[in-house]
Image (tube, rainbow, N blue to C red):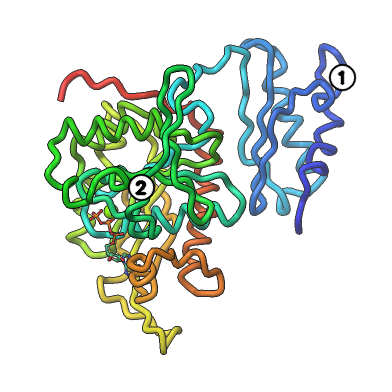
Amino acid sequence: MEIQKEKILEALKVIRYPATKESIVTMGMVRDVKHREGELWIALQFNKPNDPFIQSLKKACVRAVDGAFGENTLKLEHIQILLPEAPAKREVLPHVKNIVAIASGKGGVGKSTIAVNLAVSLARSGSRVGLIDADVYGPSVPKMFHIEGERPLARSEDGIEWIIPIEKYGVKLLSVGLFVNPEDAMIWRGPVATSALKQLISQGDWGTLDYLLIDLPPGTGDVHLTMVQEVPITGVVIVSTPQEVALADVIKGINMFTGDKINVPVLGIVENMSWFTPEELPDNRYYIFGKEGCKRLAEKMGIPLLGQIPIVQGIMESGDSGEPVALFPQKAPAKAFHNLAQAVEKALEKRNIELEPTTKVEITTR
Ligand SMILES: Nc1ncnc2c1ncn2[C@@H]1O[C@H](COP(=O)(O)OP(=O)(O)OP(=O)(O)O)[C@@H](O)[C@H]1O
Ligand SMILES: [Mg+2]
């Protein structure tokens, strides 16, 4: 059953703030209502941290929602209490709602493929999406979007030179690969590469975005540190293949983000190359890298498994031809990416309700 936001607000409207006897809805205390698959989150605004009615109003919300919809139809999963101190203003990319890094401790597991198709899927469902190719040594996004050789334009405003991202398939794109030949990028030394990347982030004319995805290079090196120090990453999506040897490196990757010094939330794991399906036998699955390795890893590490993407020849070919498979919704792999996009959106919503915004990481020792 589709429940509309208005219906939920209507149910909450009967609740009165005891001090004024006015409805919490008309007073504007209900700042946000989100629901998906029978789970509801709401955000309530209070004017002071020690408001005596916080607990009783939380209970009243649960009762009102249960009464209106029945616990089995809609369950009030979380109530966020908003307090008046203005949240710290984000100076970097202030108009970007969610900054999501796509990472893995290991090379060649499909980070770029996932980042590109995730970006296209999100854009197709109406979100404003940007993608930064942070793989400064081996950029692959230009090829995957078939924009090799294109040069982003620049514009000046208030003495700042803004780089205008290239827009393709509804996604705004910047990559070091658009400024130099990929072969030249290979020989860059750390500081040059990271300063080029910083420029793409801070001088990119990204405008307002719902999601800015960052396709990270393999490993846990300089570029990763630069990213967490330069931008407040909302969350990380970890990509792995299911076999044991990949998982060991992936654990290192996860620990880098969740360790004390960095502490960026991991949204979940995507299992890529989960099984092989031949085009002529679409119902057959061959678990050539083992079955459900990432599911076990996710359980062990207490993080969600966001999706499983099969090995399909078309995914590889679409990367090479510069037309991401997510552009073709009738094809099975596009559905897998669409489901993944939904899972990532949901994980972000949950993260944004439960945790404070990420701040840039200050790392003084290495
Ligand atoms: N699910 C899949 N089915 C078929 N081919 C895939 C799949 N995922 C990735 N590939 C192919 O595997 C190769 C490596 O993928 P990709 O470049 O996305 O990995 P990566 O993790 O970004 O690599 P790197 O660590 O070098 O950045 C590419 O040729 C890509 O087309
Ligand atoms: Mg890559």
On-image quarter of the N terminus: bottom right
Give x and y (percent) for residue 281.
Answer: 41, 88
- Asked whether the viewer can see residue 162, the reply is yes
Gap between marks 2 and 1 measured at Cα? 46 Å
Q: Which mark is residue 44?
A: none
| 246 relative to 111 in the view: left or right | left
* Above/below status of 47 relative to 338: above
* Above/below status of 82 relative to 131: above
The residue shown at (46%, 70%) is: 333
Q: Which mark is residue 22?
A: 1
Task: Give the amino acid at mark 1.
Answer: Glu
Quarter, ligand 1: bottom left
The residue shown at (62%, 21%) is: 82
The residue shown at (45%, 67%) is: 325
Q: Which mark is residue 102?
A: 2
State whether label 1 is within 8 Å of ligand 1.
no
When asked about the image quadrant of residue 308, the answer is: bottom left
State whether label 2 is within 8 Å of ligand 1.
no
When asked about the image quadrant of residue 222, the answer is: top left
Which of 242/230 is in front? 230
* Above/below status of 176 relative to 87: below
Give x and y (percent) for residue 328.
Answer: 52, 69
Task: Give the amino acid at mark 2.
Answer: Ile
Which of 46/215 is in front? 215
* Above/below status of 283 relative to 18: below
| Count of all numbered marks drawn on residues in the image | 2
Do the CB atoms of the residues marked 2 and 1 lie less than 8 Å apart?
A: no
When asked about the image quadrant of residue 258, the answer is: top left
On-image quarter of the C terminus: top left
